[in-house]
Image: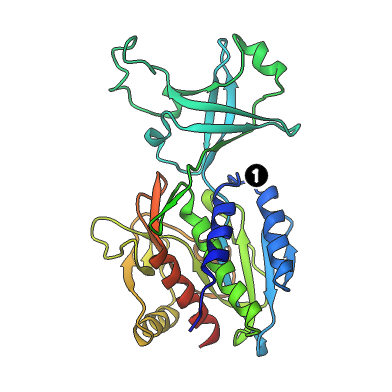
Amino acid sequence: MINVNKEYFYDTLKTLLMTDSPSGFTMTIMEQIKTWTEALGYHYDTTQKGTAVITIEGEDNTKTVGLSAHVDTLGAMVRSVSATGLLKFSLVGGPIVPTLDSEYCRIHTREGKVYTGTFLSTSPSSHVHKDAASLQRTPDTMEIRLDENVNNKQDVLDLGISVGDFVCIDPKTTIINDFVKSRFIDDKGSVACIFGVMEYLSTSSIKPKYQTKIVISAYEEVGHGASYLPGDITEMLAVDMGCIGDDLTCTEYDVSICAKDSSGPYDYHMTSKLIELSKLHGLKFAVDIYPFYGSDVSAALRAGNNIKGALVGPGVHASHGMERTHYSALENTMKLVYLYLTA
């Protein structure tokens, strides 16, 4: 069984979580992924739309299996600048908007400048606005206050900020008692899990059973992450967060195996094999159906890729808000991914 390098895993996870990478703005994090990949001795390539493809030679290279995880996150873009120098925004992906109220953020301009600010409602003060507590939080009733001396629209434009600039939400990453608290554990927790497995394979000189191509996608949060796949992949295991909540059995300590989500059932034989491996090796796991969910496998199948697909991942509480998981869920996920590749 895999012996995870916990220090390597946590270092990788923290770097991933604290690097801004909303969908469409993943260039910096992909360079980091390339550096890590090459340091482990594996081949890194990229597609035209910025998806990373990492190739690991197998004991048998006549068959190619795929792993996927996505490094893109939720975020926003500047929609307009108000007459008083506040920013209106458009969402990237589906963050729970009320959780953005009072969150810090960073605005990246196309010239490479970075400014900080705060998401606030248009009624931000209880001493001034009667509806400060009751106002519904939506993009139309919220704005971004810049940490700059700006008093009007032109002041903001003079900073180089313009429509279409990316707004990145501060993840507030904290690790305490092996609990990981942060935005964007979905799906950077899974990317770190894959690198935890890769590090073990590399340092232990272990090859997976079949040639493996790891797809790190950059547009999953907007629906088309792994819609294109290398043509030699015959089956793909998506590693993405497991859901926790009503009518679900997964906890923050489990690896979740998804039998079905909103895109339909996952491959019966792959899912059965993952359940069998979990039972055989004593993993803490749950099997669930996710009511409002789609994965990179969903995108790949919808795009017409001729693959079998399944989905696993660490249990994550409060997804698309201020998320939390435990190292146990991450470790169980790494063990199951390792077993999938080597069993």
Q: Nearer the viewer, residue 273 or 112?
A: 112
Quadrant hosting residue 305: bottom right
Report the front residue among 86 and 114.
Answer: 114
Q: Answer with left or right where residue 247 lies relative to residue 225.
A: left
- Categorize mark 1 by other alpha carbons within 10 Å: few (<14), some (14-19), many (20+): many
Residue 1 is left or right of residue 132, and the answer is right
Q: Is residue 188 above or below residue 127?
A: below
- Residue 238: horizontal and vertical position, in percent? 51, 68
Residue at which label 1 appears: 25
Q: Residue at x 49, y 23 (%)?
A: 143
Q: x, y percentage for residue 102?
A: 43, 28
**Residue 222 visible within the image:** yes
Res 301 seen here = no
Residue found at x 53% / y 28%: 89
Give the image location of residue 209, x and y in percent. Answer: 59, 87
47 displayed left or right of 303: right
Percent position of residue 98, x then y: 37, 33
Q: Identify the residue at the far left of this view.
A: 247
Please tell me which residue lies in front, 52 or 179: 179
Please give the name of the residue rendered at 28% of the width and 12% of the height, measured from the top-left corner: 130
Q: Secondary structure at mark 1?
A: loop
Q: Relative to 271, does residue 175 appear above or below in the rendering?
A: above
Q: How is the image coloured?
A: rainbow
Q: How many marks?
A: 1
Q: Is residue 279 above or below residue 128?
A: below
What residue is at 72 percent from the left and 68 percent from the top? 39
Residue 321 appears in which quarter of the rendering? Answer: top left
Quarter of the image where one finds residue 117: top right
* Identity, as a three-letter code, of the amino acid under mark 1: Phe
Q: Nearer the viewer, residue 46 or 113?
A: 113
